[in-house]
Amino acid sequence: MAGPVPHAVVVGGTRGLGRVVVERFLARGYAVSVVSRRAPALSDLGPGLRHAVADLETLDSAQDLVRRVVELAGPVRYIVFCQRYRGEGDPWRGELQVGLTATKLLIEGFVDHFEDVPDRAIGVVSSVYADFVGSSQPVGYHVVKAGLNQMVRYYAWEMGRRGVRVNAIMPLSYIKPESRDFYLSKPDLLQLYDRFVPLRRMGNAEDSANLLDFLCSDKAAFINGQCIFVDGGVSVVWQEELAKKMGAV
């Protein structure tokens, strides 16, 4: 007799990478609970989708939210954190609250609500800005992504003792389903990525979702506490080489 349908939770799973992650879990036959402020427009993805309303900007306790999510589809097997601060208030406080505090509260809230199976895992979407600095994102974003990487390492140790793996991915800027038309209309921008990315293309949401799909599976059963670049190899190239190449020296 088949067991219960496995349950995955995607925090911030309404658009972009989050939506693609949801699609991956649904394709595997999982029940998926999306945690977000607004209901996802994902009704076309099938009956396995649930939604738990939550405003991460004001979240100060995860107990009620965790209870509601578990009531939707039972104990969880995998959790993926894709959320990003999109508010209009103080960006420093907003980034810290949505990126770090809400993640901490939810990880610790779910700690006793994982399914009793050999493989359980948490995936976190960090960024290359955890290790590097760029003007396209504010200081709070940099600090939060760096903090998430350290949080991943800490919980990999603490929750690894309970059999729950914790890892992060660190994408370069990538094309989302919602931004595909924009980038396709900018051939000069795509050519720029062709010049400085060793794999000679810009990444897309599917690249990152594929890695999260792997990390949230028993194929990654001995991978824990890792923060993995998804950047086509940019991070291994010394800046002077990039400067020479871009300057055609």
Image (cartoon, helix red, strand yellow):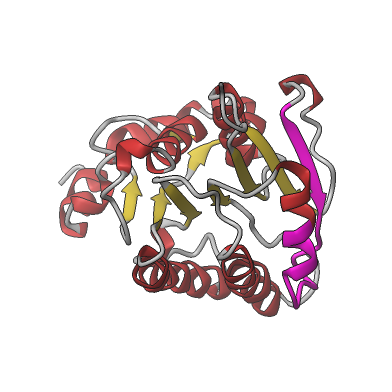
Q: Please state the horizontal and vertical placement of residue 134, each as a whole percent of the image.
A: 44, 63
Q: Residue at x 80, y 50 (%)?
A: 52
Q: Is residue 21 above or below residue 60?
A: above
Look at the image and give the residue range highlighted in magenta. 48-67
Q: Is residue 94 above or below residue 198?
A: below
Would you say residue 49 sits in the magenta stretch? yes
Q: Please state the horizontal and vertical placement of residue 102, each as a whole percent of the image.
A: 65, 69
Would you say residue 107 sits in the magenta stretch? no
Q: Please state the horizontal and vertical placement of residue 24, each as a whole percent of the image.
A: 54, 29
Query: 121 or 86: which is nearer to us?
Result: 121
Q: Is residue 166 left or right of residue 115?
A: left
* Image quadrant where residue 179 sits: top right
Query: 220 or 1: which is nearer to us?
Result: 1
Q: Is residue 238 left or right of residue 128?
A: left
Q: Please state the horizontal and vertical placement of residue 107, each as a whole percent of the image.
A: 57, 66
* Image quadrant where residue 15 sits: top right
* Furthest residue in direction front, as rendered: 1
Numbered marks: total: 0
Q: Residue at x 51, y 35 (%)?
A: 205
Q: Residue at x 32, y 61 (%)?
A: 225
Which quarter of the image is occupied by the N terminus? top right
